[in-house]
Amino acid sequence: MHFFSAVLIPFFTEWGKIEFGTIMLLQAWFMFCVFILEIPTGALADYLGRKKTMGLAAILNAAAAITYVTSPTILVFVVAEFLFAAAVSLFSGAKEAFVYDTLKSIKKESQSKPIFGKMDSMHLLGMMVGATGGGLIASQFGITAPMLFTIIPIMIAFIISLTFTEPLLEKKQEVKNYLKIIQESVNYFRHHQALKQLTVNMIFIHVTCFLLIWMYQLLLQQLNVDIALFGFVHTALIVSQIAISSNFLTVEKILGGKKKTLFFMGIIPGIMFILLGTTNEFFIILPAMLLITGFGLTRRTLYTSYFNKHIPSDTRATVLSSVSMVLRFAMIIANIAIGFLVNYSLQVAFVVLGVLIVTFSLVHSVYEQHLI
């Protein structure tokens, strides 16, 4: 329930007084910090337990929100982004490992795909409430208020984390050196061809589609949409993701199987990006954005189900963090590149992203046998 998500661009440009290119450099810094912390925090989750690391993630998340509104200076923003990165790193990998190993402990891991889909839908529902409220909070109490209000649900999340029960691993984990866990997990990822191929396919399209989250508010500003409505547009983007992520099995049946589903979940967003760059009609722009987020941003959740089938329990959080680490590195490059491109032309940026996604979808595919 990040209330600030609905007004991020106005928050930076109006209160922080920084341009879009600088915003993307800040996000590149955030991704770099997550990149550096991803493997150590994943190993920490495997070493100390996922429950403790998720609770710590909530505390750091709240600290980041408080830091962000202390002063509209770039140094404060840099520190706050580091704290956000630490929180994200602690949470990523740990939550999926926690859920999957819980399913294994009750012998229901075969249901991981719909379970991860429903989990993502609940996550998106929280984002939807946060986004809708964020636009209204900003219009009533000022542009920094949504960041402060975010602390409330974050601390509720911390309290909830205290009630979790750590699932037992399938096999008793021997007492291992912290660095040994990291080494074993990275080596496992490096030498697992199926996992690497799935990762590349997931990352390219997820990263390019995710850039819409930073670009759509600029587009709304160009169309002179009132800031109070930003949250409702963000909510619509989230609803489209919920519609897909909560119905993965149905979508696969409609689109003709797992491999074809992944293909269409790439080619459709690519075409929609091209539309965003070639029209100013809102009745075309909104559906295009809905299709990009619905198909493009739910791929990562679908892939999580496939990833887990290839990973042993005792290093699951660390290996998943290895996947996330590669994702963060790609985001660093993408954020810097899109910052320069958008400063040149927002419309050109949309078209370039669309062409890249369509081309990648046509030339790179995954093997059906890897989609367990």
Image (cartoon, grey):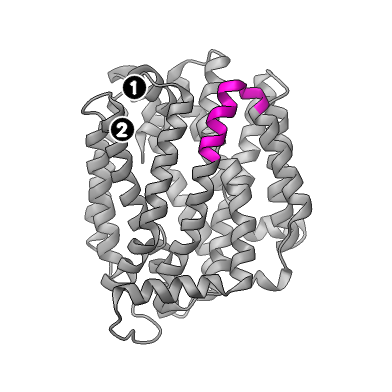
Q: Residue 241: image x %, image y %?
A: 56, 45
Locate the N terminus by quadrant.
Answer: top left
Magenta-highlighted residues: 334-348
Give the amino acid type for the residue marked by disc 2 in the picture: Phe
Residue closer to the observer: 35 or 238: 35
Q: Which residue is mark 1?
A: 16
Q: Residue at x 74, y 50 (%)?
A: 361
Residue 303 - label: none
SS state under label 1? loop
Say whether marks 2 and 1 touch (CB < 8 Å).
yes
SS state under label 2? helix
Q: Residue at x 44, y 44 (%)?
A: 125
Magenta segment's dominant SS is helix
Residue 77 - label: 2
> For residue 220, what is the image quadrant?
top right
In the rendered image, residue 3 lying in the magenta stretch gets the answer no
Q: Earlier in the sequence, mark 2 or mark 1?
A: 1
Q: Residue 167: image x %, image y %?
A: 33, 75
Give the amino acid type for the residue marked by disc 1 in the picture: Gly
